[in-house]
Image: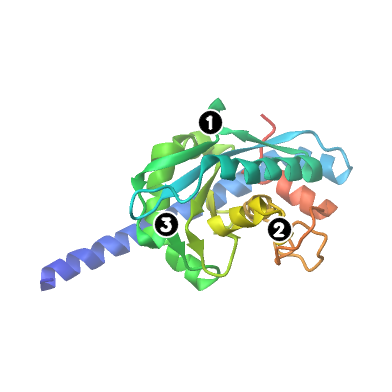
Amino acid sequence: MSFWGSIKSAFKKVVHAVVRAVKTIIHFGQEVFGRILRIFDFIMTYLGILLKKKLELRVLILRGEHGDPVAKESDVAAIVEKAKQILLGSARIEIVPTGGKAMIWTVNELAPHAALYLRGSGSDMVKDEFGDAGDFFEQMIQEYHSEATFPYNFFRTPITCFVVQNIDGLDGISPGPLESWIAIDIGALDKVKVGSQATDSSVIAHELGHSGWLLHRTVPENLMYAPAERGYNLTQWQLMVFRSARCVSIF
């Protein structure tokens, strides 16, 4: 690459990083504004009054580098159904498809290696989010889940769940409440199919909890317990935080 080509490439990366940073700041503003609007529900939850709320979800199954889907829609449907049961039972949050459309889709585009094989949590997840994986996920959200973008998402933020080939050492990841996607490893589906207690299908519900500002807990019975052998319970404080997050709405 020529000198000017290198400069141009570096400039594009800087602009891209600035755009992503600005979007994150906007998402933070939406979260703060949304929580102010939801203060009534926050108080109601504190008093033990849990009105049924909704969380809009679309699941996108990626295609591998040779064009084959990494998972069958029927296998993914089982783990989504369990997530619905968990959140409705634990938080009175109903997982619904966005805009009344199908919840589970298989994308047509071939996914890049970086999106198929995520590097896990911590700094590696940040690199994925601001690298090729994050770029591809953003493109897919625009194409297959446009309802999750502005202005539709100003008062509520639908979540997109990507089914990927592998996440290093994990069944699922979430980049946190300021983003609108989570990802699960196809290995979690295999454990569900053989009836393993290793995940008990709770991975999607767990990652959605992170999207709603819930942190890991050390109590095995809690949904936010990091190891896969977890229960489905949520504390009153967790309910107050989760149910007033921007990914959850009353409508």
Mark before the other along the chain sequence, 1 or 3: 1
Q: Earlier in the sequence, mark 2 or mark 1?
A: 1
Which residue is situated farthest in the top direction here? 100
Q: Which mark is in front, 1 or 3?
A: 1
| Residue 14 showing in the rendered view | yes
As drawn, which residue projects farthest toward the front?
194
SS at mark 3 in the image: helix
SS state under label 1? loop
Q: Is residue 162 above or below residue 103?
A: below
Residue 184 in picture, x, y percent from top left: 56, 55
Q: Which residue is mark 2?
A: 196
Residue on which disc 1 sits: 102
Amino acid type at mark 1: Ala
Query: Would you call the spot at circle 2 few (<14 residues within 10 Å), some (14-19), or many (20 or more)?
Result: few
Specify whether 16 is left or right of 92: left
Residue placed at 71% from the left, 64% from the top? 216
Check residue 134 in the rendering and tell me which mark sits there, or answer none.
3
Q: Amino acid at mark 3?
A: Gly
Closer to the camera: disc 2 or disc 1?
2
Q: Amino acid at mark 2?
A: Ser
Residue 173: percent from left, percent from top: 57, 60
Circle 1 Cα neighbour tier, 10 Å, few/some/many (<14 / 14–19 / ≥20): few
- Distance from disc 2 to disc 1, alpha carbons, whole Å, reads 28 Å
- Callouts 1 and 3 close, C-beta under 8 Å: no
Q: Distance of mark 1 from mark 3, alpha carbons?
A: 23 Å
For residue 187, what is the image quadrant?
Answer: bottom right
Of residues 44 and 206, the one nearer the viewer is 206
Question: Total label count?
Answer: 3
User: Is any atom of residue 206 visible in this view?
Assistant: no
Q: Position of residue 94 (x, y in %)?
A: 70, 36
Q: Secondary structure at mark 2?
A: loop
